[in-house]
Amino acid sequence: MNKPQLLMIINSFPPSGGSGVQRALKFLKYSCQEGWEVYVITPKKPTNTFIDYSLLKDIPPEAHIYKVGGLGIRTPEYAKITSTCFEETMPKNPIEREFWRLVKFFNDLFFPIDKQIGWVPFATHKAKQLIKKHNIKNVYITASPFSSFLAGIRLKKKFKNKIFWVADYRDSWQFAIYMKTKILPFRQRYIEKMDEKVLRSCDMAVFVTDPNRNEYLQKYPWLEPKSCTIINGYDEEDFKDVQPLKFSYPTLLYMGKADLLYGNLLNILPAISLSGIPNLHFIHIGIIDPFLLDEIKRKGYESYYYEGYKPHKEALNYLCGADVNLVIRQNDEESKNALSGKIFELLRAGRPILSVGPHNSAIANLVNETHTGVHAFIEDPEAIAEALRICYSRRNDSPLPKEVLEKYSREYLTKKLLSLYPEV
């Protein structure tokens, strides 16, 4: 009996590191375990500047990996052009400020989607070859970067109903908060046009949260029958042989990105001293905007310890050993809908979760429903301090039972993805 086949186009792929890599990587891993023959098209060179070779172990040996070249531009995590989007990090010199405004204009003009668009023609060409050679019917494309979806449009135009294409939205595209506030209007209009084109072309659009899906349905009601939600999750195998770090002091741990858009730690640090927990260490593993790090140093927050990016397995040792784990989002509409894979790893780690962000967010609801932590409004230092005290007092509580966690497992979620494809 022939195996069902799946072609995956994945731009962010090991050895590239970061949370954005995990979702598609786990879909690949468990699709192979479910007996599917999987073909993956990915760039030859990593597309970001931080590398995590430990993620390579999750690539199944039986998967067919095709690394193709291209003209995609590798960018650092904190490019200069990004920093000019914020008043705090905009150059102070008027001449330099005008120069970077001009650079940003040309960036929006020449890269209206993203800087990986130069890789798309090469990925599309390889995909056409594989579809023809192996008679592949099932196609999965994940974004961001959203230029990857252009490959799906071109494949659908050529093969029409001979393929079934699932577009996996790891993030909202046209509704992302930074889109309408940090890019020029002509680029926003172009993105809205291309986003709709993707949705009309694909056979199924997958979103990470119901609120993300609902904001698209409000604008495009016709999308309802060809869309669904598949949340992020955790991989039980990642937690095998985890060795929780033993800290000799009270520990609040943050794993992830810290910047002005997604996680401003300056909202958290004042609550450390207000909490009254003696010798509390706020440990950060991940990446941080240099501006934010300089501000933390300038303001003299001695409780903050930055330990840089850690390989995923090592990061889990931190998570499982900390007294309290922190998840933080800004007070904006996009953050209300966010449910990153990280929050599910925090659930599995079994430590109390301090959730800081907007009122009535998806993360706040999850933490409250599972009774795994306490949520506090990001603009209320006193509330954050009180939530931190409560979480710390629960540091010896029992973790969630495995049967409760099961619905968040990557294995379960992969089965849900594969069920979207018609019988083969």
Image: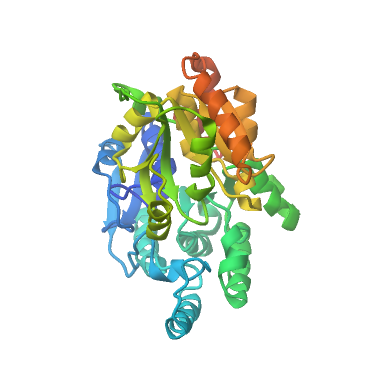
Residue at image point 50% right, 75% down: 108
- As rendered, which of 153 and 338 lies closer to the eye? 338
In this picture, is 205 found above or below 271? Answer: below
Residue at image point 54% right, 47% down: 267
Q: Position of residue 211 (x, y in %)?
A: 67, 45
Quarter of the image for the N terminus: give it.
top left
- As rendered, which of 122 and 395 lies closer to the eye? 395
Q: Quadrant of residue 228?
A: top right
- As rendered, which of 240 and 276 lies closer to the eye? 276
Image side of residue 332 versus residue 233, left or right? right
Image side of residue 105 versus residue 256, left or right? right
In this picture, is 61 found above or below 396? Answer: below
Q: Position of residue 142 (x, y in %)?
A: 47, 51
Q: Position of residue 339 (x, y in %)?
A: 56, 40
Residue at image point 43% right, 38% down: 254
Q: Is residue 199 visible?
A: yes
Residue at image point 53% right, 64% down: 157
